[in-house]
Image: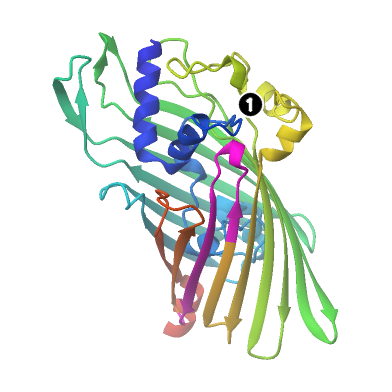
Amino acid sequence: MKKITLLLAVILFVGLSVQLTHAQSRTSTTGANTITTGVPFLTIAPDSRAGAMGDAGVSTSPDVNSQHWNPAKYAFAESEMGIGLSYTPWLRNLVSDINLAYLVGYKRLDDRQTMSASLRYFTLGDITFMSEYGDPTGQQSPNEFAVDMGYTRLLSENFSGAVALRYIRSDLTGGQLVNGVETHAGNSYAADVAFYYQNEIRINRKISTLAAGIDISNIGSKISYTDGETKDFIPTNLKLGVSYTTEMDKYNSITFAFDANKLLVPTPDSSKVDIFNGTTSDKSPISGIFSSFTDAPGGMSEEFKEINFSVGAEYWYNKQFAVRVGYYYEDVTKGNRKFFTAGAGLKMNVFALDFSYLLPVAQNNPLANTLRFTLSFDFEAFNKQRK
């Protein structure tokens, strides 16, 4: 059974930089004690706007991709309805057939309520499975997807809340037999809870917006790929963010955003980690959430190292052309992901096109040269144009 778990971890290692960088850190001499979870594809930034701002998106102005970052932002969306499609070729420095696609949309029901939904699909390309003797046992195309629906409600003039329900399916083995044991696709159910606040203020006779957001995502059941007792936590995550937007003049505006993220799953005890068999926890998902704030073997100093930071800036000219930059930081003992990001956006009457580019700090990083593309469609602008 432990060998099956190891096989699944190896597949994730190939497919996701999150797992890859964590695995690299574990073998270093920096005292690394990284946190790994099942289905880490849920933590990948799917859209180009936040991807260009260092993965900061919890408190930025509402857009069609708010479902991933903070669905409570939909209460303040300018348009009545929107839909977006994002595409990310993933880990192109390693392989050529790993991709992430993201389809999202929202519809305002009335002045206070909004419904939203999204589909996230991650394919790991073609993988040839081998027996323990090195003989090919078949070729599969592992893939994972998550589909969710959200409900957002305006709670006051400046404050909103949202909940989202999610179904997750991860098929990494295609039903292959591993050491005579049958494997199957992993399934899980999860929920998000989010809140958002924004308020317009005047500073030096200029209109500015101060915003803050909180999103707890992927609160749900563990996931397993066999009928045994081995189960992995899904990446329950706490996101906090603040942003400040100001109009420089009639045609120019700029936004500064800051996010902090922390996984709400148990921290492994590095002194007890077996690199061949891994570790498991008998804690429930809810118990894991509460204990995640105090269970690091290194005490509170290690707990603070588990917080990742994102900073980003966005400049708009005439609400039509945007330039974005950002930086993402993760402690060297918790994965050591550090990268700069940049991107641009063009907004027309009906369509908007955005792209982002990732530049890691370290050389030979599998995330190097990551590109994201996002196309969004504004139905309200389309209806106005028809009229």
Answer whether residue 339 is visible to the viewer in this image: yes
Q: Which residue, given by chain and number where applicable, does mark 1 sit on? A: 267
* Residue drawn where x is 54% and y is 78% of the image: 322
Q: Is residue 338 magenta?
A: yes
Which residues make up the magenta segment?
327-349
Q: Is residue 355 left or right of residue 49?
A: left
* Residue drawn where x is 57% and y is 29% of the image: 220
* Residue drawn where x is 32% and y is 52% of the image: 92
- Hey, which quadrant is residue 245 in on the image? bottom right
What sort of colour scheme is used for the picture? rainbow
Q: In this view, does 196 lie to the left or right of 347?
A: right
Q: On screen, 235 above or below 159?
A: above
Which class describes the residues within 10 Å of circle 1: few (<14), some (14-19), or many (20+)? many
Q: On screen, 292 above or below 98?
A: above
* Residue drawn where x is 75% and y is 72% of the image: 209
The type of residue carrying mark 1 is: Thr
